[in-house]
Amino acid sequence: MASKFSHHHQLHVFIFPITAQGHMIPMISIAKLFAARGVKATIISTPLNAITLAKTIDQDRLSGLDINIETIPFPAVEVGLPEGTESVNQITSLDMMPKFFLAVDMLQQPFEKLLEEYRPDFVVADMFLPWTTEAAAKFGIPRLIFHGTNMFSQCVAGSLRIHKPFGSITNDKESFLVPDLPDKIEMTKSQVPEYITGGTESLFSVVMGKVRESEQKSYGVLVNSFYELEPAYADHYKNAMGIRAWQIGPLSLRSNDGTLDKAAKEKESSIEEHNVLKWLDSKKPNSVIYVSFGSMSKLSNGQLTEIATGLEESGSSFIWVVRKSMTDEDENYLPEGFEERMEGKGLIIREWAPQVLILDHPAVGGFMTHCGWNSILEGITAGVPMITWPMFAEQFYNEKFVTQVLKIGSQVGADEWKDWVETAEVSVKKEKICKAVTQLMSEDGQENKEMRKRVAELSEKAKRAVNEDGSSYVQFSALIEELQMSSKTSTSQ
Ligand code: UDP
């Protein structure tokens, strides 16, 4: 009888993302990666998210990948959220967040039912689902964590937590060195998340505490990054922080054939892809700056006006993805006559753009980004230098990685960490935006040339990492082999 002990036992993984675009996109890629290596992958999702999800894995199923979806109802109404809320992207104010996390915690019981029913060999679950470690352990199943970020930022956060170098600093804008890291990293207190600097307990400090605790008890961490991008931090993370980790990215590149992952284009675009590409085809190489702030940030009208003016005054061609704050009802955030003047020069995309395709186009020569990790890694993979405009979460750490370690971008000058994705303020004025764009897009300047050269080299390394024999491919193989072994051992006991 072909038993679990035979060489052909098919591993089964549960992939459980938190329902936020920036986490779901890479985790669906992880599911596909596993499935492409013969592992059965079951994505755990919620009913509405599952509808979109089903479309993104259709093609993969047709091509024979063993990839499925199981749903758990999301108890939105039970916790006082509007019916149909299932995703962080639908949360419109900070005070809805505790309810969202409560609903997420209520998924534990139904999740355990699924574990009991299917008995997968291992679970890969999002950092924001810390209880999955304990849930999986009840059935003797190991859990791996996906944070959605890189190793550098984990190391910075670890150092800030332990050493509190901002403790004696009274001026929020004064720079200090982040201790005990492979490089000299400078930041200011105003850029450090409040859940680290704050003395009192907050929703996020409690959540992050649980996340850290679960890290200690989990099997290890999967990272969307590749060894050659941050070797010193990969080593530091494992040695100084003592957590096992596998770097298996860039996840926006599909396994070993270098083709783009459809998951990155998962959401419906507000604009036809071919229209964007046609528009870009008419532009000179490296002449267009792509401006986008990810899937969550929503800017105030005042800030949008500053960006419009800054872009216009820079004289550069641009693609700008506009996601406006819902609290500003006024639709008139563009300066008078802006769209007519920018005809042919600038393309505005509302809400959602095919980002990976845009970044990969040869006409795109710069990326103004909010420093979400997926965006930065997609920029690196495409070989595009950046203007960094961090806002919340771990984005200021990512900025330091881009500007101080990799040296492939410059700061626009945002200097205050925000606790929410939507603010009423103007944090960067048009003069700074114009200056940063003009500098990055200019064809001359030694610094610019060197920056472009560095990011081009990293792009090559990124592509090599996912090729067979590349570092990410090899690390992923080693993980699967290890899990295969431990599953055999546990089933033979
Ligand atoms: N994204 C996209 N089109 C958009 C905005 C975002 O395709 O208009 C994708 C982007 O390519 C990335 C993800 O959504 O994969 C955003 O993740 P990131 O970590 O950059 O930021 P977050 O949205 O989590 O703040």
Image: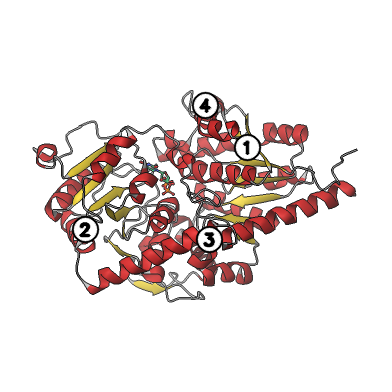
Label 1 environment density (alpha carbons within 10 Å; few <14, some 14–19, many ≥20): many
Most foreground residue, 269 or 134: 269
Name the side, left or right, on which 477 lies relative to 102.
Answer: right
**Residue 478's x, y, as percent?**
68, 59
Q: Which residue is mark 4?
A: 51
Ligand 1 within 8 A of label 1's CB?
no
Disc 1 marks a residue whose amino acid type is Leu
- Residue 157 percent across, percent down from the top left: 50, 63
Q: Nearer the viewer, residue 385 or 272?
A: 272
Q: Are marks 3 and 2 in contact (CB under 8 Å)?
A: no
Answer yes or no: do the residues labelled 1 and 4 have beta carbons within 8 Å?
Answer: no
Q: Amino acid at mark 2?
A: Val
- Nearer the observer: mark 3 or 4; the answer is 3
Question: Which label is found at residue 65?
Answer: 1
Q: CA distance from mark 1 to mark 3?
A: 23 Å
What residue is pinned by disc 3? 465
Quick check: can you spot residue 199?
no
The colouring scheme, among rainbow, by chain, secondary structure or one colour, is: secondary structure
Q: CA distance from mark 3 to mark 4?
A: 32 Å
Measured in 3D between alpha carbons, the distance from the residue under mark 2 to the one under mark 1, in whole angstroms, is 43 Å
Along the horizontal axis of the image, is 195 left or right of 210? Answer: left
Q: Amino acid at mark 3?
A: Ala
Residue visible at 35% across and 55% down? 390
Q: How many marks?
A: 4
Q: Which residue is denoted by mark 2 in the rendering?
A: 437
Where on the picture, by quarter, is residue 423? top left
Mark 1 vs mark 3: which is more N-terminal?
Answer: 1
Work out which quarter of the rendered image holds the N terminus and state it.
top right
The amino acid on which the numbered mark 4 sits, given as a three-letter code, is Ile
Q: Position of residue 441 (x, y in %)?
A: 21, 60
Ranked by sequence position, the earlier of labels 2 and 1 is 1
